[in-house]
Amino acid sequence: EAGVAQSPRYKIIEKRQSVAFWCNPISGHATLYWYQQILGQGPKLLIQFQNNGVVDDSQLPKDRFSAERLKGVDSTLKIQPAKLEDSAVYLCASQGSGYNEQFFGPGTRLTVL
Amino acid sequence: QKEVEQDPGPLSVPEGAIVSLNCTYSNSAFQYFMWYRQYSRKGPELLMYTYSSGNKEDGRFTAQVDKSSKYISLFIRDSQPSDSATYLCAMITQGAQKLVFGQGTRLTINP
């Protein structure tokens, strides 16, 4: 079974630039999550999708972050404009119905200079 | 006060030692307790999963939950260098899907 795929793996940008991350969840998983993991901290949920609808985006900084999940499969997370404090690993996770286990991708490491 | 507190370490022990990792939490509604292991430059992977209070053993790993004290632990017996990773505790309330993570403990097992 293929795992959660994310790209790119690494990204370096200047502050005020924009950036987008892509996630392909495990086939058949209806729930998809985006987390932000700052160095030395645990992952923090940014947004949760159930199929292509948003379940929880209470911790998403909506003035600069946006996310979509078209057709209930792949998802993109965008930051525009980026700030220095956005430097972190952005993790995507997916979860199947009836299970509590979330499967994580390898993450995208973002550095904002 | 954070919902979940975890000693960030780092923790360094010799191979073969027993390792104890701990988390405390403040939300009494948490019912499911998990331990994730995260290797460098990888995503977290589920290691142990416990519902409510009690112990659960899986090979060299034992997870304990004490809801009366709002305290959970992960024990690693006969630790190996391959156990070197960051260990994250995570919790979730009944019926919810939002995981709340501790900040992670970085563990190094020295050969």
Image (spheres, helix red, strand yellow):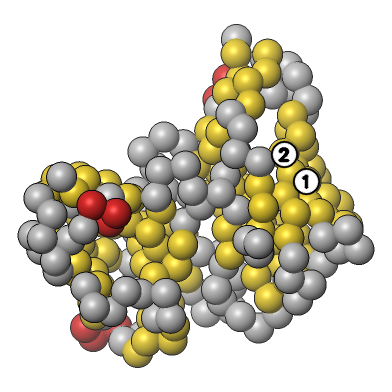
Image quarter of residue B100: bottom right
In this view, A107 is above or below A57: above
**The C terminus of chain B appears in which quarter of the rendering?**
top right
Q: Residue furthest top?
A: B111
- Whole-number angstrom distance, CA of label 1 to CA of label 2: 5 Å
Tell me the amino acid under the disc marked 2.
Answer: Leu
In this view, B75 is above or below A84: above
Image quarter of residue B66: bottom right
Tell me the amino acid under the disc marked 1.
Answer: Ser
- Residue at left offset 82%, top offset 60%: B70
**Horizontal relation, residue A15 to residue B69: left or right:** left
Q: Chain of mark 1?
A: B
The residue identified by callout 2 is B21
- Counting from the top left corner in percent of width and height, residue A62 is at 28, 79
Q: Chain of mark 2?
A: B
The residue identified by callout 1 is B73
Q: Earlier in the sequence, mark 1 or mark 2?
A: 2
- Counting from the top left corner in percent of width and height, residue A42 is at 51, 52
Mark 1 and mark 2 residues within 8 Å of each other at the beta carbon: yes
